[in-house]
Image: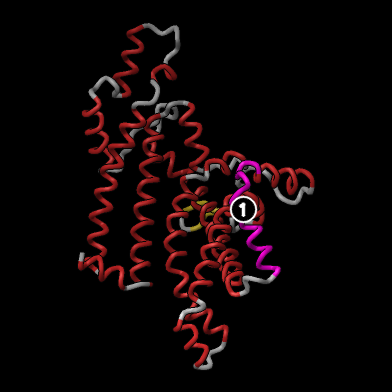
Amino acid sequence: MTVFIIRRLMQSVLVVFVMSFLVFGGVNLVGDPVEMMVSDEADQEERERVIRSMGLDKPWYVQYGLFVANAAQGDLGKSFVYGEQALGIIVQRMPATFELALAALLMAIVIGIPLGVYSGLNSESRFSKVIMAGSILGFSLPTFWVGLMFIMVFAVMLGWLPSTGRGETVELLGINVSFLTTNGLSHLILPAVNLALFKISLVIRLARAGTREIVHMDFIKFARAKGLSTQRVIMVHLMKNIMIPVVTVLGLEFGGLIAFSVVTETVFAWPGMGKLIIDSIQGLDRPVIVAYLMIIVLVFVVINLVVDVLYSILDPRVRIQDVKG
């Protein structure tokens, strides 16, 4: 197990290094932040002063070397717009995005897995067909349109839930969270459901496919022949085997929830990293864009590492084959 984790860590470090080069190079090829920061009436001397202050007068490889050296010390640059450390600005917004993503992931697990297992065990029932039709809608409907409909129905027409903002927050282990207050939870419901719809549909289909495949296998038949209750067969023997692909996909999808919550955060004015990156792109705030992308890369790398470890626990053959390889 230790060898397996060390190999994965080494691969993760290589991925982070390669992605840092691609992110830095890609962002620095887009636009000219000097044009956004300097007035059209400024003279050439003023423009050169701004260029030097931003470090843009150095060759790209020098800029990249400085970026890597500073990043190793936790310094991802200073925002051109806010004049503060880019990492600090993103860290301030990070709890809101993680809270929204975790709420959506929890909904996908709690709703998607039971519905998928039921649909797999009772594939010909009417309720199963309703579940699958609902999953198709979850895949098909655009996130921004669903969000706008949620706001129109539940916020404007019915007045049950607020439409924008994060609401009241309280401090938990030094982090501001909203789900522990009634007002904050009411603000969280609509954006979390909107973000979770696609993931719920995905989990339903994964759990259904896994259930239909495994329920006819010999070890399930033997478990039933031994006289085990249906509940024990499902919860112990079936669930453990269908969770292997579900854990893998959910791990990657959690990274996607964090990285691609931009639309939901924009529609519901949720003060997370997604809304920040949209504002930074509009203002060509390169340090914030690079810092955001590097954090997303690290999130994906860490999640992949955790998923690999969980996968190897659920199926020991994975780490055995890796060691042999």
* Left or right relative to 117: residue 162: right
The colouring scheme, among rainbow, by chain, secondary structure or one colour, is: secondary structure
Residue 302 spot, x, y in % from top left: 35, 55
**Circle 1 residue:** 138
State the residue lying farthest toward the bottom.
226
Task: Decide: is 27 above or below 116.
Answer: above
Quadrant of res 145: top right
Quadrant of res 308: bottom left
Residue 240 spot, x, y in % from top left: 45, 75
Q: Secondary structure at mark 1?
A: helix
State the residue lying farthest toward the right.
157
Q: Residue at x 48, y 53 (%)?
A: 175
Q: Residue at x 61, y 53 (%)?
A: 138
* Left or right relative to 38: residue 8: left
Quadrant of res 182: bottom right
Residue 187 spot, x, y in % from top left: 64, 50
Q: Name the foreground residue: 67 vs 317.
A: 317
Q: Name the foreground residue: 54 vs 255.
A: 255
Please state the extent of the stretch shown in magenta in the rendering. Answer: 126-145
Q: Confirm whether the magenta stretch covers residue 137.
A: yes
**Amino acid under disc 1:** Gly
Q: Name the foreground residue: 195 vs 212.
A: 212
Q: Confirm whether the magenta stretch covers residue 91.
A: no
